[in-house]
Amino acid sequence: MTLPSGASRTQTFRILSLDGGGIMGAFPASVLATFERSTGKRIVDHFDLITGTSTGGIIAIGLALGASAEEICRFYRNEGLAIFPKRVGFRKYLGRVKNFLRPKYSNEALRATIQKVVGDRPLGQAKTRLVVPSYDVNTGKVYVFKTPHHTGYLNHADLPAVDAALATSAAPTYFPAHTIPGRGTFVDGGLWANCPAMVGLVEALGFLDKAPEQVRLLSISTTSYPYRIGNPDRPRGLIGWAPQLIDTFMFGQAQSSVNMAVCLLRRGQFHRIDYLVPPKTFQMDNVHCVEQLIGMGRQIAELNENMQVVSREFLNGQTVEPFEAGGRP
């Protein structure tokens, strides 16, 4: 990888983008923990901005508030079963019936486990800029939680970080929508930005006045698989489409986000870390795959094609300057 002509390292603006995917967040958490362990450098000290959606938003918030990637890895390993409790026997079948009427899980365990990492601290105490997508169901509009890193971003400064985390991860059918009094009711940002690479890039270029050549963007998935809708000639109604709608939306959005970022940035400025697995290897709430995901994350992070790029362009010892709350970038 070579730097674009005329770009200066002192001007580099580094962005970390983390996809959504429920318990599969163990994969990017492990990737980041391996990078921190191998380089001896902290993520939060080397990225000017972190953006994450859903489980990626939880990771982003935890990192920005000072948690190590290893601590977040333990979050998935130790708390997964509390967040996604397994149903067995009659309760399993009864739960399936109830899921037609209400979310599959309560968010109380998720709240408690997030608070173990971030406590009651507000977004304003983040050590680096945060951009966390969600969706406001009251207004029917996309919504983004941000640290007060700009004069126009002061309204979230005192917002408890746990509220932003619950808002971005309130996946429909899995968790209830999250209401923040006086602010709105929110569901998972994955509805429009499951891969938030473009959210971070737009923030840098459109709101923070960074030039495209300054940006270095590291995007990490929660694994993926070869996706096919199926026989295009097969007639499909509601029943035919329903099982595939969520995957279709998520894969389509992720592909468009990655492709647009590649088009806007020059060669070497964008690096995507993904792991291709067989279809349906993992599920958002299958906690029994956590150790496998952590192992895969460690394995792919250790590949030369990833470790060398991250060591040279991101965790290279050139720490970022803390942003000034309410100040111009």
Image (cartoon, rainbow, N blue to C red):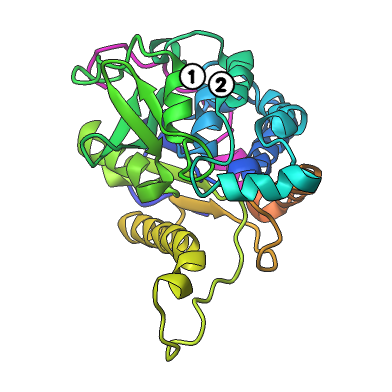
Residue at 30% across, 19% down: 149
Residue 186 image-quadrant placement: top left
Whether label 1 touches label 2, CB < 8 Å:
yes
Residue 185 percent location from the top left of the image: 33, 29
Residue 7 percent location from the top left of the image: 35, 43
Q: Which residue is mark 1?
A: 162
- Residue 108, can we see it? yes
Residue at 59% across, 71% down: 226
Q: Which residue is mark 2?
A: 111
Between residue 269 and residue 108, name the one nearer to us.
Answer: 108
C-alpha span from label 1 to label 2: 7 Å
Residue 37 percent location from the top left of the image: 74, 30
- Image check: 142 left or right of 72? left
**Does the magenta stretch mainly form a helix, a strand or a loop?**
loop
Q: Residues within 10 Å of mark 1 (few under 14, many from 20)?
A: many
Residue 298 image-quadrant placement: top right
Residue 171 percent location from the top left of the image: 48, 42
